[in-house]
Image (cartoon, grey):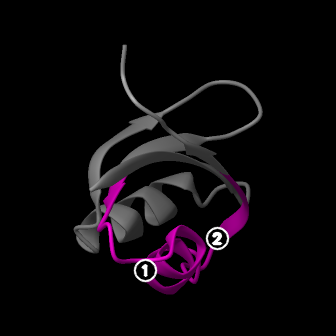
C-alpha cells in the first residue's frame, strides 16, 4: 500500500457535507479539518496495483462540493 495525503478545498458552506461523504466511502484512514488554503486533509492508502490518479479520481473526486484538491505523495519513512 502507498500512502498519500489529499487536501480538499470545499465550496463555502459545504465542508461538513464533503467530509461526511468522504468518510462514508470508507477510503480514507484518517481525516482532519484544517486551517489555511484547504479545508480538509485525508490520509489514503492506495493499493500497489492501482494508479494513484485514477484511484483517487474514481473513489473521491466526484463528490459534490469539492472545488479543488492537492495530493501529496509519500516516500520511504526515515
Q: Is residue 56 above or below residue 40?
A: below
Indicate the secondary structure of the residue bearing disc 1. Answer: helix
Identify the disc placed on residue 65: 2
Q: Which is more foreground, mark 1 or mark 2? A: 1
- From the top left corner, tell me how far across and down residue 50 is, in percent: 40, 77
Q: Residue furthest top?
A: 78
Q: Residues within 10 Å of mark 1 (few under 14, many from 20)?
A: some
Front-lying residue, 12 or 41: 41
Q: Of helix, strand and loop, which one carries label 2? A: loop
Q: Give the residue drawn at x 29%, y 68%.
A: 47
Q: Is residue 47 above or below residue 7?
A: below
Q: CA distance from mark 1 to mark 2?
A: 15 Å
Disc number placed over residue 47 in the picture, else none: none
Q: Residue sitting at 57 percent across and 83 percent down?
A: 62
Residue 72 image point, x, y percent: 60, 43
- Where in the figure is residue 43, as x and y percent of width and height? 38, 44
Mark sitting earlier along the chain (1/2): 1
Q: Nearer the viewer, residue 28 or 48?
A: 48
Q: Does residue 13 show up magenta in the picture?
A: no
- 49 with respect to 17 (left or right): left
Q: Is the N terminus in the top left, top right, bottom left or bottom right quadrant?
A: bottom left
User: Mark on residue 59?
Assistant: 1
Q: Is residue 70 left or right of residue 54?
A: right
Q: For this view, does 56 lie left or right of residue 22?
A: right
Q: How many marks?
A: 2
Residue located at (43% from left, 80% from top): 59
Magenta residues (range): 44-70
Amino acid at each position: 500500500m502507498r500512502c498519500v495525503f489529499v487536501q480538499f478545498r470545499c465550496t463555502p458552506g459545504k465542508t461538513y457535507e464533503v467530509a461526511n461523504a468522504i468518510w462514508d466511502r470508507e477510503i480514507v484512514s484518517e481525516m482532519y479539518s484544517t486551517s489555511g488554503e484547504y479545508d480538509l486533509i485525508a490520509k489514503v492508502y492506495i493499493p500497489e496495483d492501482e494508479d494513484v490518479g485514477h484511484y483517487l479520481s474514481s473513489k473521491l473526486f466526484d463528490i459534490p462540493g469539492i472545488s479543488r484538491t492537492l495530493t501529496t505523495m509519500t516516500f520511504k519513512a526515515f
